[in-house]
Image (tube, grey):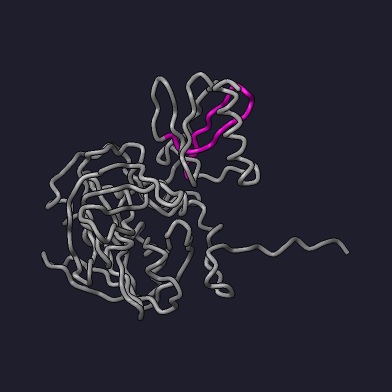
Amino acid sequence: MNNIAGMSFRIAILLALIGGITVVFGLDRVELKDGSAVIGSVLADTEERLVVDIGYTAIIIPRDAIVELKRDEPAAEQGVGIEGEAVGTALYHVAGEELAERPVQELVKTVGEAVVLVRTPAGLGSGFLVNEEGYLITNFHVIEGESRIFVEVFFREEGALERRTFKEVRIMAMNKFADLALLKIEDEDAPEFTYVVLGETEKLSAGERVFAVGSPMGLERTVTEGIISTKARAIEGALFLQTTAQINPGNSGGPLFNLKGEVVGVTNMKVLMGEGLGFAIPVDKVKYFLEHRDAFAYDNNNPNNPYKYLPPPMGKE
């Protein structure tokens, strides 16, 4: 079996394992010489090979096996996250133009109001607002099994941050396998909220400076800074950003920012026996979750299940 045939066989096995349907976080399409295709997010593109994330693992495809690489349009060009009302199925915003890097001290003042504390009877975590209507992202494990959720937002008033607690918080969608949850503040007197913009995983690089904002160990408004150690650390079949920014219990669900003030990840875990070994969910997975939130809609009749099953169509009598 030659290299191309062997590679095609391995790809065929991967596709067969998921029933011939590739469910991924990216939209790049790699056409192969044997007539098949791989759909995923291209992590690395060199003269010799492509590395493609197909959702639960990453595969290497030799260049001599590829006919064509088709890249999908970025979210901003699809009308997602433009200024004003959210467009299409998305709820988030992206920068309309390339942003300049700024000092962390300046950025914290800009994004501070959009980072929230998520509190439940069992504990607390962090989160961040993705639009002005009160939609926010946190980790699934922060709200798992909970029905009473409170969100504390810190509004800037005359140069100081004023805490305000919102008690009418609804679970909109959740995906326990990606450790993501979408909440919505529904208090009648809720104002328009300050929100963050989402960046792109593809533009990240190892060694790039980042910072996290959250409430580790309940110490709210804590800022930690570090770098991206690697942008594709495989853990239990999923890819995470690895960072030296300190991550501790209470940081879970909070944003990891680049120096442009864009969210590039959602902090969710660390290595307990080490320091500077934190991990975050890549922002592209967050975008996928938001754009396909109907598939993960919360069902009151089955609150422990992250999937919503639609009723079967009625048959003809």
Q: Nearer the viewer, residue 32 or 81?
A: 32
Q: Is residue 282 magenta?
A: no
| Left or right of 240 on screen, residue 171 | right
Name which quarter of the figure residue 309 lies in: bottom right
Q: Position of residue 150 (x, y in %)?
A: 34, 76
Q: Nearer the viewer, residue 87 or 28?
A: 28
| Left or right of 19 on screen, residue 142 | left
| Left or right of 188 on screen, residue 99 | left
Q: Position of residue 85 (x, y in %)?
A: 41, 53
Name which quarter of the figure residue 188 lies in: bottom left
Quadrant of the snapshot with the C terminus: bottom right
Q: How many marks?
A: 0
The residue positioned 37% from the left and 60% from the top of the image is 137
Segment colored magenta:
25-42
Look at the picture and state if 72 lies above or below 198: above
Residue placed furthest toward the front: 1
Residue placed furthest toward the right: 317
The residue positioned 48% from the left and 63% from the top of the image is 173
Q: Position of residue 62 (x, y in %)?
A: 48, 24
Quadrant of the snapshot with the N terminus: top right
Q: Nearer the viewer, residue 12 or 181?
A: 12
